[in-house]
Image (spheres, rainbow, N blue to C red):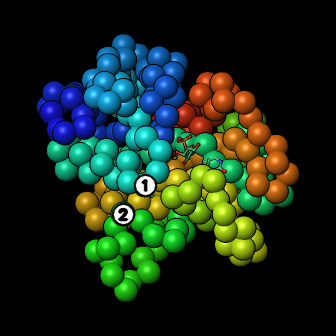
Amino acid sequence: MTVHISAEPGQIAETVLLPGDPLRAEWAAKRFLTDPILVNRTRGMSGYTGTWQGQRVTIQGSGMGMASLSIYVNELIRDYGAKTIIRIGSCGGMQEKVGLRDLILAMTATSIATPSSAIMREINFAPSADFGLLQAAWQAAQQMPGAVHVGGIYSTDTFYDERRDLTEQLMRHGILGVEMEAAELYTLAARHGARALAVLTVSDHLVTGAALPAEDRERSFEAMVEVALKAAFV
Ligand SMILES: O=P(O)(O)O[C@H]1O[C@H](CO)[C@@H](O)[C@H]1O
Ligand SMILES: O=c1cc[nH]c(=O)[nH]1
């Protein structure tokens, strides 16, 4: 047990899928895992462990934002021995070519700052995905009907953004989408020698204003989960 995860030693798999939303963790575990067992309920941040095609997998909520994700990822890696962590999250589209429900595989995650910025001091670290996971996810996504995009995303602390000028610069530089966790996930994985990737589904769009309803954000992300699972076990 850790401060934020009540699982017993051995109850967390080496491969963890990490949605921000704990209800998505529950939905994905029940939809994709065989014999999922609830291993964490501390603070309502559900975590389930089961098997997928015979492989042990944990699906654990991370909460919203890099500060919350940092707590879960530190405990998952340092206390439970997680080795592969794949974020399965929603994001806002930032390019016209990116449509609602499209997948984005985040090759890099730009941010203003992460919880790790304090230890980086003057270094502007470039958080990036594990190449093997990225390549495997790309190959898995080729078998899916929807569109998939690979490139840079933006990890922000503010869902309600007041800096339209920054958003415009990021769009101008080809950033595909915005979410709130991947930059810290990639930084922690680099620090601790784990593999990480963010597989994202576009839930709304900063250019067109289109948006999926909340229920879809929770339940309609099958492709993202399938790609993450296939990438983890190539
Ligand atoms: O759908 P999840 O994984 O929560 O991800 C996105 O949704 C939340 C904001 O609504 C943030 O956590 C953002 O990163
Ligand atoms: O963090 C997020 C998630 C979805 N859409 C956004 O605009 N931001």
For the residues bearing labels 2 and 1, Cβ distance under 8 angstroms: yes
User: Where does the C terminus fall, quadrant-wise?
Assistant: top left
Where is residue 10 shown, x and y percent of the image? 17, 30
The answer to whether any part of residue 178 appears in the image is yes
Q: Determine the secondary structure under disc 1.
A: helix
Residue 204 tag number: none
Q: State which tag comes first along the sequence, 2 or 1.
A: 1
The answer to whether any part of residue 139 appears in the image is no
Q: Is residue 12 above or below residue 153?
A: above
| Horizontal arrangement in the rendering, residue 103 relative to residue 72 (left or right) | right
* Residue at which label 1 appears: 66
- Mark 1 near ligand 1 (CB under 8 Å)? no
Tell which residue pokes out farthest to the bottom in this image: 122
Task: Locate ligand 1 by image quadrant.
Answer: top right
Q: Is residue 130 above or below residue 15?
A: below
Q: Nearer the viewer, residue 117 or 125?
A: 117
| Horizontal arrangement in the rendering, residue 222 relative to residue 31 (left or right) | right
How crowded is the residue under tag 2: few (<14 C-alpha within 10 Å), some, or many (20+)?
Answer: some
Residue type, label 2:
Pro
Q: Determine the secondary structure under disc 2.
A: loop
Where is residue 30 shown, x and y percent of the image? 47, 17
Residue 115 tag number: 2
